Amino acid sequence: MKRLLVFGAVIAVLAVAIGVLPLLALTMPPGAPSSCLKAGRVVHVPEELAATTGDGTGVALDHAQLTHAATIITIGARIDGVGRKGLLVALMAGLTESRLRMYANTGAYPDSARYPHDADGSDHDSLGIFQMRPAAGWGTVAELMDPAYQARAFFGGPTGPNAGSPRGLLDIVGWASLPKGAAAQAVEVSAHPDRYATWEPVAETILTALTAPASPAPGTSSPTVGSTLPTATTTVFPLPAGTWTRTSSYGMRLNPVLQIWQVHTGVDLAAPTGTPVLATAAGRVEFAGYRTGRGNQVVVEHLVGGQVVASSYGHLRDGGIHVATGDLVSAGQQIGGVGSTGNSTGPHLHFEIRPGGAGNTGVDPHGWLSSAAEVTAADVDPLGPCPVVTP
């Protein structure tokens, strides 16, 4: 799915709408691929991580780099045939090509600066984590400025976006029998084929750190909620474009079920039963289950300018919760289906934004929603990443 919103605009809207600053971070519905493996279940994303390359050089990785690593790991883990080795190959390629940073390239594509990025590069017309080139057929500028698209393109295979041309990892016959560095080179086709292998120890360190439960250092407390969340860069409307009608806004109203006047702490968006419900931003699932009134509900916490903000999705259909508590979700990922459970008069999504976290009261989400990108139903990926292992 394409990321359609520049992060700077989100920050501005959030600052006005809910009194906080900058945004936040990757789950499994029933029927997720059998390839989901424990090695790909991202548990947490550290603020920083130290590692050493094969030639003994020390490397310090920051939160942004590790967030991109989490995207690669989570997407790869749900693709049949990738396995642990494929995850390591992709991390090695990303480390070699960009040090796991999203590069724009304003010299070749001025428009690339409109998309969230970590830095501006100048290597031919290469873009993103894997330095993929639009001219080589990897994708459009908009697609290649999306870390998730880059990961899918790198892995390729039957579910890849490029149908084997250019070749992703799974499109290379016998890749699993190659040394990891050679497999990375087979995808990247670099003029410097020997440079990938030196990053294997760093890739191993990253994969272990992101998929193993975090243990606080002696004498320190457990990580805070915010410190374990990946950083997101976009917001997405919680229902696909053209599927919904707003039937009730935030504010005082006569509750149609209870027939009492009370504050409506969110907005109601009517849509057909089963319509995909999308995570409005990246974050961690704080609750997924049944609650009186809201019926089947999912609550996701996001990190916004160092502060926790929660989004809530109520009245999901029976069997329509596609995530579990503790899962990491990406913006635009399907987390459920519209329903009419709980106190409801018809199929709709009750959507809330709660500054401070899941336990707080919802505020008017109009500012949040007005800045969110709408995606089409065709862009919705029905299968989320693998479930997160709760420490």
Image (tube, rainbow, N blue to C red):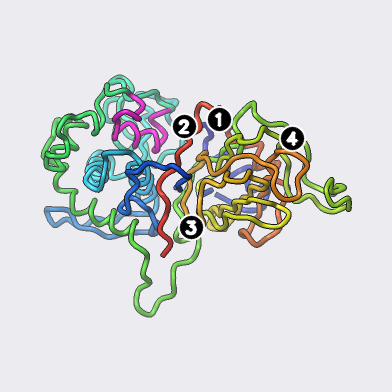
Cβ atoms at labels 1 and 2 below 8 Å apart: yes
Cβ atoms at labels 2 and 3 below 8 Å apart: no
Which mark is in front, 2 or 3? 3
Q: Given the image, on which type of amino acid does mark 3 rest?
A: Gly
Indicate left or right for 260 with 177 as reference. right
Report if residue 144 lies within the magenta region: yes
Q: Given the image, on which type of amino acid does mark 2 rest?
A: Met
The residue beneath circle 2 is 1
Which label belongs to residue 239?
Answer: none
The earlier-in-sequence mark between 2 and 3 is: 2
The residue beneath circle 1 is 375
CA separation, marks 3 and 1? Answer: 25 Å
For the magenta stretch, what is the residue range? 143-162
Tag 4 secondary structure: strand
Tag 1 secondary structure: loop
The residue beneath circle 4 is 246
Q: Residue at x 26, y 39 (%)?
A: 81
CA separation, marks 2 and 4? Answer: 24 Å
The residue beneath circle 3 is 326
Q: Is residue 7 visible?
A: no
The earlier-in-sequence mark between 2 and 4 is: 2
Which mark is in front, 3 or 1? 3
